[in-house]
Image (cartoon, helix red, strand yellow):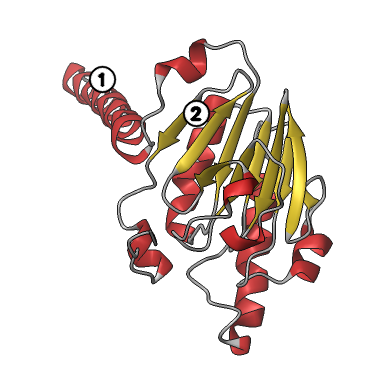
Amino acid sequence: MSSSFLSLSLWGRQLTHHVDQLKKHVIDTVLTPPIPAEVFESAADCLVHVSDTPALTYSSLFRLLEKIKPNVLIHTGDLVDQLKLGNHSYLHSLYQEKVECFIRQLERMPVDTIYLVPGNHDDPDILTYTCQRSHVLSGSSLVNFGPFKLGVAHQPQNLPPGADFGLYGHSPDKPPANSGRPLSGLQSINVLLANGNIYSIPYPRGTDVARGIKIRPQKL
């Protein structure tokens, strides 16, 4: 074997290594949402809250869950938000295919407990049938997390009263005043620690376009 061939082979392996490192850098710094250092440094239990997720967000969400390894994930509805199932019944088969794929991958994530709240563009029966270890909640529920009582609903007006925090999606409208501190999964990915600290992580660029909505100003 000639020395020139060996040199070329070594150069090829080095180039492949550099390309792999570049890909990892792009994924870690561009495609993965920035995660506050405090999330990793805290010993408190961790909860991640998302809502209204089009397929464009899935890879970023999975990478975030793999990094954070939260104790709890709460999704407050519209799991395949680019498909408006509530408006177009002919999308039912495609929705079932997409949501089953999403849930299967979601349940492989390093998350202890997963709660799903059906949105107005979800089929609760399909979610219940598909889930192996996720818990499908009713449209308005209370969940305990650390010392806190969490109200969860897809639409803000459906949040139950008496909670410490109200987790919701669907619209930027303000929830009832008695539903706790509002956390909108439509506006950002929320990270709640059991010590009460809250961090907001942006969704990938283009998420609102993929949702097919234009964010309206909150009602005063």
- Mark 2 crowdedness (10 Å alpha carbons): few <14, some 14-19, many ≥20: some
Q: Is residue 102 above or below residue 96?
A: above
Residue 24: percent from left, percent from top:
35, 30
Q: Which residue is mark 2?
A: 198
Task: Indicate the amino acid at tag 2.
Answer: Ile
Which secondary structure, mark 2?
strand
166 vs 194, nearest the viewer: 166
Task: Indicate the amino acid at tag 1.
Answer: Leu
Which residue lies at the image location 47% right of the left edge and 54% below the top edge? 186
Horizontal side of 219 relative to 192 (left or right) equals left
Which residue lies at the image location 48% right of the left edge and 56% below the top edge? 174
Q: Considering only order in the chain, which callout, 2 or 1, is on the residue closer to the N terminus?
A: 1
Numbered circle sitting on residue 78: none
Residue 86: percent from left, percent from top:
60, 80
Horizontal side of 61 relative to 23 (left or right) equals right
196 vs 109, nearest the viewer: 196
Quadrant into which the C terminus falls? bottom left
Which residue lies at the image location 82% right of the left edge and 50% below the top edge? 132
On the image, which quarter does residue 122 sit in? bottom right
Numbered circle sitting on residue 10: 1
